[in-house]
Image (cartoon, helix red, strand yellow):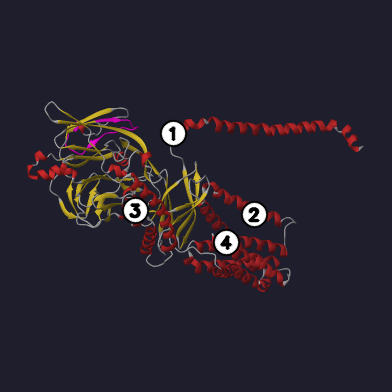
Amino acid sequence: MADIGEWLRDKISRRSLLAGGLAAAGGTAISTSGALGQSQHAGHAGAVVTEAAPASAHLAAHGAMITVGDVDNERNGFDPSAMLTDWETGTVSELPDGRTLRTFEVTAEDKEIEIAPGIMFPAWTYNGRVPGPALRATEGERLKIVFRNYGSHPHSMHFHGIHAARMDGVPGAGLIGPGEEFVYEFDAKPFGCHLYHCHALPLKRHIHKGMYGAFVIDPDPARHPEHETVARSRQLGTPENAGWQEFVMVMNAFDTNFDGENEVYAVNTVAHAYAKQPIRLERERPVRIYLVNVVEFDPINSFHLHGNFFNYFDQGTTLTPTLQTVDLITQCQAERGILEFAFKEHEPGLYMFHPHQSEFTELGWVGMFDVVEAVS
Amino acid sequence: MTDIARSSVEPVAGAPVARRGRAYLLWIVVPLAVLGLAIAWLVAADPLSGFRNGAPPVEKLTFERTILGTDGIRLLLRAGGSEPMTIAQVQVDDAYWQFTQDPPGAIARSGTVWIHLPFPWVVGEAHAIRVVTNTGATFDHEIPVAVPTPTRDSLSFVSQGLLGAFVGLLPVAIGLMFYPVLRGVGRNGMNFLLALTVGLLAFLLIDAFGDALELAGEAAAIFQGPVMVVLVAAASFLLLMAVGRRQGTPSGLALATFIALGIGLHNLGEGLAIGASFAAGAAGLGTFLVLGFTLHNITEGIGIAAPILKIRPPLWSFAGLTLLAGGPAVIGLWIGSLA
């Protein structure tokens, strides 16, 4: 999204800002007895002005309420910014009957990951990442998922989709022990924004340890003549789809001390990832977000967009929005949907997004869109 | 000459003594050497590696001091547990907050660090601190009522001194002022008063011991709090006994002085308690707490006066006894309020 030079500049100025901002917040803001929050905000803004203003403004918006330091993406083996657009499309071949066969290979692995700066979590992963790979297929294709369990516990892949009982990923139907392999096979239907997760027991632990991922089935335009253009815009690889800026976001959380309550909330695992490194949006191109909630222990999660409204497609199984012009949607666990919005009419700038459970926001699940003019 | 004579005479008796001395030494060295070898083997060969089952290290973190100031919250933390600990993040009221750690890096076993949070705390309200370590373990600390931590300025120094005098010196002086009356009180009256004093002191002993054990339980595990309380109490008791009984059972002014000394130590503790409760923001209890301390300390004056009823000590000795028994309260208050 940003080239390496920009990224480095951004990172360096952020470091110096942390120090400057801390001093400003400590020295000036809190010592004034009046409106503490306000003056602290002002203190930060003041520190920002002396720094490289555009690169640091996104941090000023969070004041001192942010995690300290950075997560080592290289050690984790995944980068939350890259994850946003990292679709796993598998390998494609043709079946004798002319249909497309799409094959995915997924392994379960135990892996310690850094979920917030300095906080390590003993995760169970699909393909070494949390959330697991964002699988993407097209409606009507035959899907084959080769699943190998290299983990220390029994695991499975339970897909939210239409399939036979044998393929359900529950005990007795595709749940495999360590070292075993299973092949899930079914047709890609219905189209929409779905998910998969481990259905081994106890379910709570297998989900919150990191075994989940997005599973998106694009509509086949040929099957939806009445909404062909819309369907085409949803299908990965078409020119219509290239006009959109698509992101996949899995809202998750981690109970680091195993007391049944989450210590860290995020989208795509790393707390404050998009607060510290905002998501660059081109003003002219519309935005589509595939949003999935897998948060364990809390009954509900939500998504709120600042300064804008969006259309919402509940579970993504329709081509017309199920909710129009809203700036907040709620999702229980495994609930998901597609958000569509545009910043065409907006001035460039930083637009925040977060759940409207303030607690989740303050524990790491908050980010920014950095809306910029089209990059030539 | 004498040397030669002795050396010529004594070998007969001296050699076995020297040999026995060497044998003694040997039997001290050998067990210690075995212990040393056992430790060296344990460290070098690591026979316990088989018990290591991938469990994360044991972590302990004790919050020793909390300072609420104009620049936010400062916390003094002491690490405990099996390995050095690393603080990854700090939450205040369920929100991750920027912080600085001094000194930075991992905290060695039993080491301490200061954490500074530029947090806009609210006077009179509660705040909860949660420290998250690199393993994801959490340690909580509650600030039940947030008030600014007293600073060392001269005004509070004087007012604390006055308070200490009110709690320590005044009641002892009042108690001693009963001296003329006590001289006239009969044997039964005196017994009643002394029984009252002993009863109060017994109550205080139990009460103070309970409090001390409770406080010791909150201290870092490395200090072995409860054992420390018992050891210190026993040591002070023995020390006072030894000093007091050095020249036989004391009586008269000497006994009064020892009682005053004991009461002085006790008042030092009271001063510490009051000072600490002020520092901890429990000043709301102030008036009644102070009045309670003052009232019960009057009986202490009576206790000091009892042994000197039969003699007529000089007037200055009354002043001295009052200072000895009550003065430590002032010092305790100063120290306690700074803790």
For the residue pair A160 and A22, the one nearer the viewer reads as A22
Locate residue A52, reporting x and y percent: 37, 55
Q: Check residue A16 in the rendering and tell me which mark sits there, or answer none.
A: none
Tell me if residue A354 can be seen. Answer: no
At numbered mark 3, what does the secondary structure look like: helix, strand or loop? helix
Q: Is A73 located above or below residue A350 in the figure?
A: above
Element type at mark 1: loop
Which residue lies at the image location 58% right of the left edge and 50% below the top edge?
A: B228
The residues colored magenta run: A146-166
Q: CA distance from mark 1 to mark 4?
A: 47 Å
Main SS category, magenta section: loop
Indicate which disc residue B335 carries: 4
Please report whichever mark, 1 or 2, sits nearer to the chain's N-terminal start: 1
Q: Alpha-carbon neighbours of circle 2 within 10 Å: few (<14), some, or many (≥20)?
A: few
User: Gap in Å between the C-alphas at discs 2 and 4?
Assistant: 23 Å
Q: Which residue is mark 1?
A: B53
Which badge, 2 or 4, comes first in the chain's sequence?
2
Q: Alpha carbon of mark 1 to alpha carbon of mark 2: how far? A: 47 Å
Residue A283: where, in percent of width, then height?
22, 52
Q: Which mark is residue B237?
A: 2
Q: From the viewer's perspective, is the residue at label 2 or at label 3 nearer?
A: 3
Q: Residue placed at 32% from the left, 36% from the top?
A: A128
Residue B16 drawn at (x, y percent): 80, 31
What chain letter is assigned to the residue under label 3?
A
* Residue A149 seen: yes
- Going from N to C along the chain, the mark reached first, 1 or 4, is 1
Question: Gap between marks 1 and 3, in whole Å?
Answer: 46 Å
